[in-house]
Amino acid sequence: MALTKDPFLQAELANWCKDAGIEETYALILLNVPVHTEVAEIEETMEAVKALGRVRVRDTREGPTSHSLLVLCECKQAIDPKRIPTEVSWAEKSEPWSVIVIQTQESASNAATGGFTEKFAKFLMEEGKSLSDIQALISPPSAPDSSPESIIRAMGEVCAKTVKLPSDNAYRRLHTFSAVAPTPLGEENMETWMDQARLMITEGDCSEKEKRRRIVESLKGPALDIIRAVRFSDPEASALQYLEALESTFGSSESGEDLYFKFRLMRQGTGEALSEFLRRMEKTLSKVVERDGLSPRLVDKVRVEQLIRGAVNSDMMLLQLRLRERKNHPPSFLSLLK
């Protein structure tokens, strides 16, 4: 199969990489991946291709059929299209996965002869669109439901989206943080303070100026010195940029990718309750997402996979929860905790 040279799939890969914020030369798309395939299984299969090195799944989309997926993968090293197979076998008696990578400029110029397909693919790339956008435009809209129940439901949805809650001016103040180690009495450590500050930024219904003020008033010592330097270099820096500066200075140097593979090695400890293991997993998983180590769309799926793999002391509990049967439609963190 010569799918890797298909200009439509090339355009899809280029636009998908742009949306995911990754380099095209480090990415590939897998076609014909069954919907029930685990993320870990995909990564392990692709890492068997030595030319790719370490591989991680960044995102998934609905495939050509309801039983298949398109999977976006990012590789540790730049991809050489000449060394990558067009197909990868993953299980006996199963259809192989097709591999789509960005062709080099030289091979692309040889393939492009000015035909309609090539011109259309180029147009999509220039406009920042994908095949999914075109399909959405040509798909016939579903017939409106005019029943009383649907009208009431629609009005409720409109109200939920338009009614704004009153401003939370009484938002709890952040505790003091100085970045001094060990943490002085009466202060928060960095991890706890960062969690509280992020919650204030995302949930606090106040202006950006007020969010910056709340952060500054909670800081002292070395932490405050860093924010003073940030404000001096960029007076318009956002509250989120304040947190990023503090984390890059005093936080862990582990990347999202490193944290992701650390998460994949987590196991339930001896005597550790399943709920405690789940909370410990969630703490690491949230940091993976924060540092762009995993797409938020894959969080529920990856969480359940790792819970099944890592819960070595809770086979009966997992059986009762029937998680193995729910991997294709994984529950959320709150559902698992309940």
Image: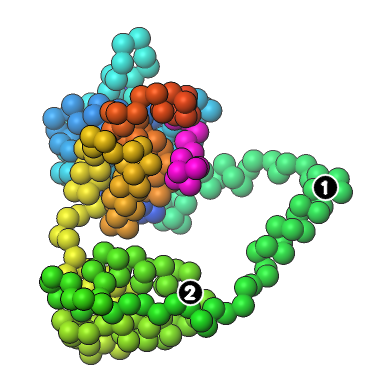
Q: Residue at x 26, y 72 (%)?
A: 188
Examine the structure image and report whether residue 256 is included in the region drawn in magenta.
Answer: no
Residues drawn in magenta: 327-338
CA neighbours of label 2 inside 10 A, class few (<14), some (14 to 19), many (20+): some
Q: Which residue is mark 1?
A: 149
Reply above or below: 87 against 118: above
Find the distance from the CA under tag 2 to the CA under tag 1. 34 Å
Q: Which residue is mark 2?
A: 204
Q: Is residue 40 visible?
A: no
CA neighbours of label 1 inside 10 A, class few (<14), some (14 to 19), many (20+): few
336 sits left or right of 143 in the view: left
> Which amino acid type is marked by label 1?
Glu
Circles 2 and 1, Cβ within 8 Å, touching? The answer is no
Element assignment for label 1? helix
Q: In terms of image quadrants, where is residue 231? A: bottom left
Q: Is residue 69 visible?
A: yes
- Which mark is nearer the camera, 2 or 1? 2
Q: Residue at x 48, y 69 (%)?
A: 203
Where residue 329 is drawn, which disc sits there? none
Reply above or below: 238 against 316: below
**Quick one: quadrant of the N terminus?**
top left
**Image location (x, y in percent) of residue 306:** 32, 35
92 sits left or right of 104 in the view: right
Examine the structure image and report whether residue 334 is included in the region drawn in magenta.
Answer: yes
> Which amino acid type is marked by label 2?
Gly
**Image location (x, y in percent) of residue 291:** 28, 57
